[in-house]
Amino acid sequence: MIILFDSISHFIVSAEFLFFTEIVASIVKVYFLFFLMLNAFKCKKMTFPLGSLLILLLSGLLGDCVWLIKLYRQLYDSSIDYRYIIFFIRLAWAFHIIQFQALCLFVESLTEKKMKIGWRQKVFMSFNFLYILYFVYLAIFNFNLHDQRTPAEFFMMNFCIVYLLSFLVLPSLYITIKKLRLTDCPKILKEQLTILIKYLLFPYVATECIHGILVFKKSYFYVEDSFSALIFTFAIYFAMRKVMGIRFLNFQNHVQATKTFNFIDDFKNVLEKLSYTNSVAELSILTQLFFKDAFGIRADSSHLLVRSLANVQTKTKEQKNELSSREVTVERCINGTNELTHEMVQAIKQHKILIYDEIVFNNFYQENALNQELIGFLERINAAIFLPIFEHATLIAYIIVDRDGRLNEFFSNVERDEMLVFARYLGNIIHLLQNRNLTLLIAQEKELREELFQKHQEINQYKESIRSFLRSSRQRKIGIIFYKNRKFTFGNQAAKELISVDLNAHMGHPLAKTCKQLVEQVESYKATQQSVGLDAQGNKLILVGIPSLEHNNVIITVYYPEIADVIKKQIDLLQNPSEWDYLLYLETTKSGQLINQLIPGSGSQLLNFKIGLLKIALSRKALFLQMPEADLLPTVEIIHHISLREKMQVVNLQASKNVDSAIQLFGINPLLGFEQKPSLLEQLNNVGTLFIQNIHLLDIELQEKLAEFIKYGYYTVYKGDQRIMSDVRVIVSSHLNIESLVHEGRFSQCLFNELQKTTLSMPSLSNLAHEEMHDLVDGFTQQALRSPTFKNLLELTEREKNTLIDDRPMSLMQFKAKIQQVLTHKSKKNKVEDSIVLDQDYSIADPTLLQAARLGKKALKDPKMMSMLWNKFKNQNKIAAFLGVNRSSINRRCKEYDLI
């Protein structure tokens, strides 16, 4: 550690460290030179302060270069003639004088609208010119006398630093500070000069004093020069970076942001609150809170003033039929008839926001009557910000921020844009308040949120679908199989990998049977035929049979499907061909797999129903289901799972329990003295699905409240007026004809109108074509049989299928259970164990329960899965029976996961 400390100490006091610091100093100066020249080129103007600053940085850069040349000779190349070193040192002293003169002119010019060089500066500039000529003379005419440097030269060097600091810098600083105090300079300009004096000039004077002491003592220590260079370099960087953000040299039109605001999060919260305001008083409070949280403005310093609210009740305007002094001033400005007032109004419309400090700064350099009038207007209303709110080019309101609302900090360009966004939205709210259309806005906003959610879900489905094809295309394989002399022969390695069974030895295997049927079709029709099979992992395979030129020979190509293969067979079955993308999602996404598992049929009616189910599941709109009671819960569970909800609550309404249902759904007014429990709409907010069975049994009054919630996204508590926002997805069902009930006056017309927007009706099994029912039987049979070994043995015959179809029930789930009964009976008849043949998860429709069932005892290790099972069953014995484990294991895990 001591050795490391000594090494660092030696490096700091060495010439190498000074060489490094001078490189850093040069880079910083080059950076700011490039930045200033680039901005000057963009602005197409060269002002006096900018020219002085460029000369200042350029002179300092030349001085750094001289140091680098001298140190380079000392450290790396001593063969360089020392006469050149002395030559550059003398020139550096000349540039040193130029640097100080430029510094003084730069500081003084910032406080002047149009810089005029006075007699004092002219005198010093003449004296400096003679000083510069002296060092230039020595550099040129004493070039060969570098080893005979006279005492006069050293005296001039010592006197130069004293002269520059005492007669140039200090008077300029004094005059500049005096102007800042005595004259009415813009606040932005004062801040710029304060930063430059505090963080640039003082460090610069300090480093020059150190340099002067070293020159005077003729003792050159690298450590002093190194730290002087570092301090000055850091001062340049810090001061320039800080001052650039506040319209330095008028490069920017607005003050630049120096920090980021959490505007989006703040605005989202305020946006939601603004949507449900009903008065200007609420808008004023929300405006004050927003300006306080987003911009750090005191709450009492932000004021929202509305010009005219013909249809909105405002107590202030009713009790006092008069305007405040601020409003009177604004009205005079808006309604003035002279030409200058008209220009002011146009300027307000053009700028969209008036910021006092920036207008004063603009007027300092570009003084005109319009700027003067705008400044006077803002001073009369004591405004740091005047934010007009327009609706169709008409000023309907404005926000005023007091001059002392936020001290010692300027409003940046980012904040300016954020205020304009807020004002634009606020203008819409005020306009709607004036025209009594606020509820329409709330409904439109809710509808927009639902539409955005559905589009987001559709995009995710599209991405998932495309990924499924990309995964298979990475290992694109096309297998070739030859069928000759009643035998299948693999033509390449890809065929063996895609088809893992021996097609000749296992003729009863489903894939072998598919290949055999394909061959028979090709031989019968003498044309190319296509079929679909499944590989060992259950993935689809496309089989294409091609007749060979040789007699009784068939060539079969095998490959994983592409997009066209997936949809071309079923696209003709669509009622709306433009929905082919949903057909693709059904076949390639997890959501589609869940729906296909619920309804494995692929006929025209069932296919269009499944597409409708998928579209509805991808949204979060309220839904009215019309289907047999046995199919309701499995369908709702699928919709709940696909729509990314976490909790589902089922409410089965009873005719005699309307009050209980009202309290359960909406809660009750706390003033009535009932025990307060969170309503279901509150419990399920943002996370849940509410399924209401027998919606026709709900009281008419409660139906109206439910319709209001579905349309606007808020509800009122039972027997109260309190509005509460909620984002629960509502699904309702009824076995009665709702339209007839509406005509009879037994059902709410408003609720009926809302439910009609999104209705899903399952096609009746009694109306399905024979082919669709046949396909449905095959689908349920494939799901029920777990082991492919016994599928040939237990496969239903045509007679058995026809018997099931002829005696078809009304419910899809009942039909599924009936098929399972037939398969169970058949497995017992063939003396095959049920646990091996039949899939025990066949009857489970809930996707989350299905996943838990397939995990079995492994689900005990998943806390999230155990929490889901506990919420479903609320009973340890039921969970143990469901997973097939001991109750003690369930009890131990429930305690470990804090479920009981």
Image: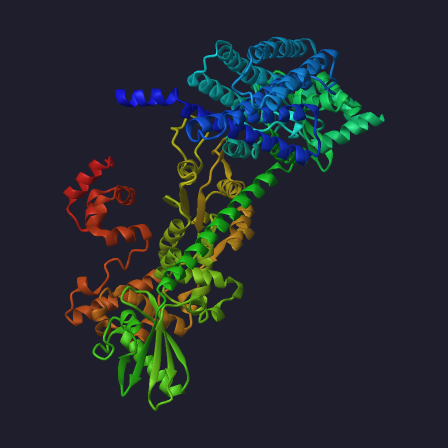
In this picture, residue 486 sits left or right of residue 190: left
| Color style of the picture | rainbow
Question: Of residues 405 and 110, which is closer to you in this image?
Answer: 110
Report the residue at 56% width, 52% height from top.
743
In the depicted structure, whether residue 24 falls above or below residue 794: above
668 lies above or below 225? below
Residue 352 place in picture, x, y as percent: 69, 31
Instruction: For residue 134, say whether it is visible.
Output: yes
Near-viewer residue (124 or 849): 124
Residue 423 shows up from this direction: no
- Give the image quarter of residue 875: top left
**Quarter of the rendering occupied by the C terminus:** top left
Relative to 886, does residue 66 appear above or below in the rendering?
above
* Of the pair 550 and 842, the residue shown nearer to us: 550
Q: How many marks?
A: 0
Q: Quadrant of residue 464?
A: bottom left
x 21%, y 51%: residue: 856
State which quarter of the image contains the N terminus.
top left
Taking the spot 48% from the left edge, 61% from the top edge, the residue there is 581
Q: Is residue 634 left or right of residue 324?
A: left
Residue 99: percent from left, percent from top: 61, 20
Residue 179: percent from the left, percent from the top? 68, 11
531 or 620: nearer the viewer: 531
